[in-house]
Amino acid sequence: MAAKVDRHLGYTLTPLAQRLQQVIATEGPISVARYMDLCLNDPVHGYYRTSAPIGARGDFVTAPEISQMFGELIGLWCAVTWRQMGTPTPLRLVELGPGRGTLMKDALRAIAAEPLFHAALTVHLVETGNRLRATQVECLAGQAIEWHENLSEVPEGPILLIANEFFDTLPIHQYERTDVNWHERLVTSGKNGFTYILATKPSTLDRLGRVGDVFEQAPARLDYMADIAARIKAGGGAALIIDYGHGKNANGDTLQAVRAHKTQPVFAEPGLADLTSHVDFQALARTAAHETAVHGPVRQGKFLRTLGIEARAALLQRDATPANAHDIESALRRLIDSQQMGDLFKVLALTVKGAPVPAGFENLVTGGRTW
Ligand code: SAH
């Protein structure tokens, strides 16, 4: 092991912190990916196994929780895409990491206006978090839904797949640039809590960087993306992936812990805070481009405006009280303004090669793109 990096001192000895100490005592320093995975998915103390993270009283708020318009527009996007696909029946409507179930509830309400599509689909939620699954059951009561631990469990055939803020939770590895090479960052445990150290052996990463730069790689995200693309190639369909991140890969440490709507040091409260990082859309697009056509990424603000969110907001405001109309306006701004979620969040779509360009991705200059 080489240079010790002491950036995140101060932490609470949570049950998960004790579990991490045991793992590190047995296995030695662990990768950032393993740290993230244990924090989020440890079967007993993991964040997604134990907490109710989403919403005003949780730790973070996502687009479907900001406004019903988000899920409704995605529902309509699915209906239009299904028509572009030639109305295959049955169609599997799949959501990865559905949170509280709000997006699917709003989407299905919008889809009900398209009875043929509604009748053609079966709904599949891929969710590993027990507490969130219970919330989804409640939120979607009365709907026929199947739950799965993994995409591979969803029955064969054409799919329409939605993933909002799903990829950012899948674990990343981090590499730090020294004067000659990139070394993987590992997490170890000492008197003052958890700290980063660098693996002695250099990684095989070959890219430019200045001393101290961090680069992130997420094989778990690429594996998931490859599964989605293979599935679309084999059975037909499309996917819509929405997340925060960058369109072109870049150096930078983007791992963040959030609890009660505030960011905190990554090692402060293991298991009690959400851990996510920026999604590298370029890497996702490159992975899928072998098997499918890739559209975007396009900024969320532009995507939602193209789908007509402003008209939908105006319609909702027409019948609202002044106070509600004001809330609808704030929600709209939050979703589409560039200083809010409009630019940082991006949308990527996959379709079968040669299929029509999906709604919201028209007029993008994609010719000659090298992802
Ligand atoms: N899409 C929701 C929730 C985003 S939070 C929304 O927009 O509100 C991330 C979601 O992914 C949670 O539901 C979490 O339990 C789920 N999740 C995290 N890792 C997962 C995995 N490996 N497989 C399936 N679901 C996962």
Image (tube, rainbow, N blue to C red):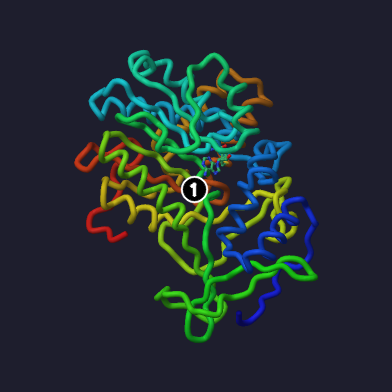
- 300 w.r.t. 175: above or below: above
In-front residue for pair 54/76: 54
Q: Secondary structure at mark 1?
A: helix
In-front residue for pair 312/233: 233
In which quadrant of this rendering is ligand 1 seen?
A: top right
- 361 w.r.t. 70: above or below: below
In-front residue for pair 82/9: 9
Would residue 73 be seen by someone viewing this image from the given angle? yes
Q: Quadrant of residue 5?
A: bottom right
Percent across and percent down for residue 157 are 30, 29
Q: Amino acid at mark 1?
A: Phe
Report the residue marked by disc 1: 167
Q: Is mark 1 within 8 Å of ligand 1?
A: no
* Left-right relation of 181 to 230: right
What's the residue at 64%, 47% (across, down)? Answer: 42
Quarter of the image that includes the C terminus: bottom left
In-front residue for pair 142/43: 43
- How crowded pointer 1 is (Cα within 10 Å; few <14, some 14-19, many 20+) is rated as many
What's the residue at 28%, 45% (across, down)? Answer: 363
Percent across and percent down for residue 274 are 65, 49
What's the residue at 65%, 33% (across, down)? Answer: 131
- 44 w.r.t. 220: above or below: above
Q: Quadrant of residue 304?
A: top left
Quarter of the image that includes the N terminus: bottom right
Percent across and percent down for residue 75 are 43, 27
* Left-right relation of 73 to 253: left
Would residue 329 be seen by someone viewing this image from the given angle? no
| Direction front: furthest residue | 26
What's the residue at 57%, 48% (across, down)? Answer: 340
Percent across and percent down for residue 163 are 46, 39
